[in-house]
Amino acid sequence: MTNGLLFSVLAAVSSGLWISMHKFASRHINNLLGSILISLTAVLLGALFLIPQMDKVRAQTTSRGLALVAVAGVFALGVDYFALRAYASNVPVSTVGPLVIGGGVAVTTIVGFFTGGPISGLRVLAIGFILAGATILARLE
């Protein structure tokens, strides 16, 4: 397995556990405060990993990169906030998790098409299956 694939698998596991933690926290914390604390935890933990390699960071950082991660941060707040809201509304993790993650896969794939990624009938079919699965899960609720 290449490093890129290994990192993809680790990201998928992290994403699934991250969205599941929203369910466990949703009844015990204000949704907006929870979203902020999730982000703060990521900042603090990220800083622990970043500090030892600060000399490499400056060479790899551009203003475009900073702007794009700031926009990603806006969307990260949206994921945290809306997932906590969904779970606080008693929607089960088996519904919210696949909807959030599957929807994210569909959106990412569509963005990929518009940014030069390959388009094929099989990829379009895969998006259709993702959307169909998300629709089925939502209707089961």
Image: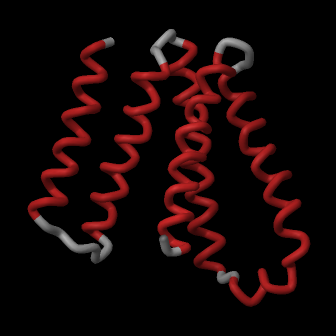
Query: Foreground: 39 or 134?
Result: 134
87 displayed left or right of 132: right
- Residue at horizontal 88%, vertical 60%? 48
**Which residue, as the protein is rendered here, is positioned at the far bottom?**
59
* Above or below 114: residue 59: below
Q: Percent position (x, y) of residue 62? A: 66, 83
Q: How many discs appear? A: 0
Q: 22 or 67, which lies in front? A: 22
Identify the residue at horizontal 28%, vertical 31% (top origin). Answer: 134
Question: How is the model colour-coded?
Answer: secondary structure
Extreme front residue here?
1
Q: Residue at x 65, y 20 (%)?
A: 24
Relative horizontal placement of residue 1, taking residue 132 as reference (left or right): right
Q: Quadrant of residue 103?
A: top left
Quadrant of the rendering where the C terminus is positioned: top left
The spot of residue 101 in percent (x, y) is 43, 41
State the residue lying farthest toward the left: 121
Residue 20 appears at what percent x and percent y? 57, 29
Residue 124 horizontal/vertical position (percent): 15, 56
Question: From what the image shows, is residue 140 above or below residue 62?
Answer: above
Q: Nearer the viewer, residue 7 or 101?
A: 7
Image-based side of 13 in relation to 95, left or right: right
- Given residues 42 and 31, the one toward you in this image is 42
**Residue at point 74% right, 28% down?**
33
